[in-house]
Image (cartoon, rainbow, N blue to C red):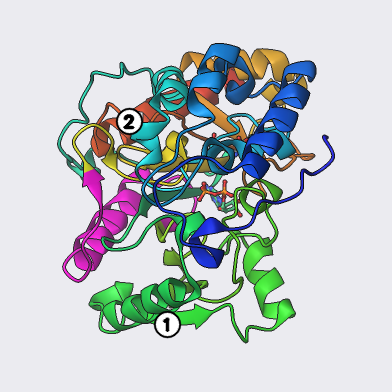
Amino acid sequence: MAKALPKPKCKKCEEKCGKGKTSPEVLAQLEAGYEKLVDSDSPSMLKRFLTKEIFDKLKYKKTSFGSTLLDCIQSGLENLDSGIGVYAADPECYQVFSPLFDPIIEEYHHVKATDKQPASDWGNAATFGNLDPKGEFVISTRVRCCRTIKGYPFNPCMTEENYKDIESQMQAALKDLPGDLAGTYNPLTGMSKEVQQKLIDDHYLFKEGDRFLQSANACRFWPTGRGIFFNQAKTFLMWICEEDHLRIMCMQPGGNVGETFKRLIAAVAEVQKKVTFVTSERFGFLTFCPTNLGTTIRASVHIKVPKLSRDMDKFKELAGKFNLQIRGTGGEHSDSPDGVYDLSNKRRLGLTEYQCLKEMYEGITEIIKAEKGAK
Ligand code: ADP
Ligand code: CIR
């Protein structure tokens, strides 16, 4: 891994830069970081798509929030093992730095820059059943989506007050949810380390200190404003102010995708009665990371595939055939030493919510068949 670059000052909080030119300090950091990236064997999309020509064109640009190219690529410069390596420091970055973001978005989601996101369509959750009725392979199912609340920028541009406002707005919004969605909000501020670690180990809570997010300036004022809501059964949960303003998720043991998805549809419908989300014609629901744009849906299973995972190259190829992404069971960038993996739909933009679920459901069905047939 590359040695960490010195952090530029957070312009949003420490100086009101607004429009104008990239400062000489930021330019120098960009040049130094870019040189290291070019000399590295980083597998990131950032490395592949940030050509010298595009770099030279974008390095002087700034959004009206004051975000520079450095704010978008710092995570990939500091973490040369990134898969993607970029974040939109504010919503305008998708436009201002589009020569970098567009090819990444096109390749990741299999869309064209001229495509528009189809209208939201969650379809009928009952068309999905249980992927593994005998409980031989699928340990648990989870479906999540991300939301940005209108009136607030992304993490790198948020003030401490913004974090507090979102937290209290959500605390109020989640107070009287109906039926089995009702639950409690648990702020990270004041939570004991033991409780926090147990929630992480049980796969309910986001981890702390993600280096990719930290170097993207997404963890400022931690733990202010961060927290988790969950219902009694911990089958409906919401993360507040982690990578995105909201991560709304439903999960449960076993492979019942229909039940899990149905609960998420109900939960999102309730939340959106109380909060307005940011959308765009082209990108659907706006998110901090370009991999989450569109529906923002990641439908995953934790699945036992000891045979298929003996040959990881072949396993990756098979998953890729069904547009599935493989993660470790501790979330993104984690390992899976025991043959249990997190498999999910990879694409989220250019298709509807229902189609995301369908892609995952059909793909996992094939993976189970392959695991059964493998020697
Ligand atoms: P996200 O899904 O929000 O992008 P991560 O990949 O970091 O974020 O996963 C967050 C947490 O959710 C991790 O603890 C991970 O193990 C857990 N998780 C994801 N999918 C499942 C699943 N199908 N069953 C149980 N836990 C899951
Ligand atoms: C990376 O580039 O590896 C991290 N910034 C995480 C990117 C998001 N991952 C994904 O595939 N959804």
* Screen quadrant of the N terminus: top right
Count neighbours of disc 1 (C-alpha within 10 A) and say few if under 14, some if 14 to 19, many if 20 or more: some
Residue sitting at x 34%, y 75%: 170
> For residue 184, which numbered disc appears in the image?
1
Lower sequence index among marks 2 and 1: 1
> For residue 288, which numbered disc appears in the image?
none
Q: Is residue 351 left or right of residue 110?
A: left
110 or 259: nearer the eye? 110
Residue sitting at x 44%, y 46%: 288
Q: Is-magenta flag for residue 255?
A: yes
The magenta segment is 250-279
Amino acid type, callout 2: Leu
44 vs 17: above or below = above
Q: Name the residue under label 2.
A: 349
Q: Is-magenta flag for residue 33?
A: no
Quadrant of the rendered image containing residue 335: top right
Amino acid type, callout 1: Thr
Q: Is residue 89 left or right of residue 333?
A: left
Q: Is residue 256 visible?
A: yes
Residue 55: give x, y in percent of width and height.
Answer: 56, 21
- For the residues carrying marks 2 and 1, which lies nearer the camera in this image? 2
Dot 2 and dot 1 residues touching (CB under 8 Å):
no
Residue 251: give x, y in percent of width and height.
Answer: 45, 56
63 vs 194: above or below = above
Residue 247: give x, y in percent of width and height.
Answer: 42, 57
Residue sitting at x 35%, y 42%: 92
